[in-house]
C-alpha cells in the first residue's frame, strides 16, 4: 500500500512500490494528462511536480513519492475551470500542434517561472532543453513563457 497526495487529494493505492508513478497516475487514478513518451526520462512528456520541482514520472518509483505533494497537469490551476497563466499563454501563442508533449512542456515551464520569474532566452533554453517537441514549436514555447512571465 502506497500513500500519495496528488493534486491535494490523499490516495491509498495497493500497487507494487517499484511501479513508475506515471502508471499509477494514469491507470490507478485516471489522470491521463501526464503522457508516456520514451520511458527513459529523455523526452519530458511525463513531467510532473513533486514538492514543486519537476520530475520524470516514467522512471520514478511510486514509493519515492510517498507522503510528498504531487501535482499533475490536471492540478495545475488554482480553481476548477480556471487555467494557469502558462496554459493561457499556450493558447494565446497557439503552441500545441499535435499536443502530445504539451503537458510535460507546461509543467517544466511552470517550474521554470516558479524559480525564475523573469527568465532570459538562455534561461528558457537551458530549462526546457530536456523537453522534446516533435512538431518543433520551440519558438512558440519560448514566446508563451515570456508572455506568462509578465502575468505570474
Image (cartoon, rainbow, N blue to C red):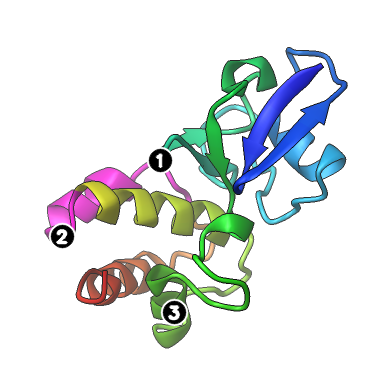
**Dot 2: what SS?**
helix
Q: Which residue was labeled with disc 2?
A: 121
Q: Is residue 69 above or below residue 31?
A: above
Are discs 1 and 3 less than 8 Å apart at CB?
no
Report how far apart the C-alphas of labels 2 and 1 lie in the structure: 22 Å
Report how far apart the C-alphas of labels 1 and 3 lie in the structure: 20 Å
At which x and y percent is residue 70?
Answer: 56, 38
Q: How busy is the neighbourhood of tag 1: few (under 14 within 10 Å), some, or many (20 plus)?
A: some
Q: Nearer the viewer, residue 103 or 132?
A: 103
Q: How many labels were placed on the picture?
A: 3
At which x and y percent is residue 12?
Answer: 79, 28
Q: Which span of residues is magenta-colored?
A: 116-132
Tag on residue 102? none
Quadrant of res 98: bottom right
Q: Which residue was labeled with disc 3?
A: 88
Q: Nearer the viewer, residue 123 or 75?
A: 75
Are discs 2 and 1 less than 8 Å apart at CB?
no
Which image quadrant: the C terminus? bottom left
Q: Is residue 98 above or below residue 129?
A: below
At which x and y percent is residue 128?
Answer: 34, 49
Tag on residue 52? 1
Amino acid at each position: 500500500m502506497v500513500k500519495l497526495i496528488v493534486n491535494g487529494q490523499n490516495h491509498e493505492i495497493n500497487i507494487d512500490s517499484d511501479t513508475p508513478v506515471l502508471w499509477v497516475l494514469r491507470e490507478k487514478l485516471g489522470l491521463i494528462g501526464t503522457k508516456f513518451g520514451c520511458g527513459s526520462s529523455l523526452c519530458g512528456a511525463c513531467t510532473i511536480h513533486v514538492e514543486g520541482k519537476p520530475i520524470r514520472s516514467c522512471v520514478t518509483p511510486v514509493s519515492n513519492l510517498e507522503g510528498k505533494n504531487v501535482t499533475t497537469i490536471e492540478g495545475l490551476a488554482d480553481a476548477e475551470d480556471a487555467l494557469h497563466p502558462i496554459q493561457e499563454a499556450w493558447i494565446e501563442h497557439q503552441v500545441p500542434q499535435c499536443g502530445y508533449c504539451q503537458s510535460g512542456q507546461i509543467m517544466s515551464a511552470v517550474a521554470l517561472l516558479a524559480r525564475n520569474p523573469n527568465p532570459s532566452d538562455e534561461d528558457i533554453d537551458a530549462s526546457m532543453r530536456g523537453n522534446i517537441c516533435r512538431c518543433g514549436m520551440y519558438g512558440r514555447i519560448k514566446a508563451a513563457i515570456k508572455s506568462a512571465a509578465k502575468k505570474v
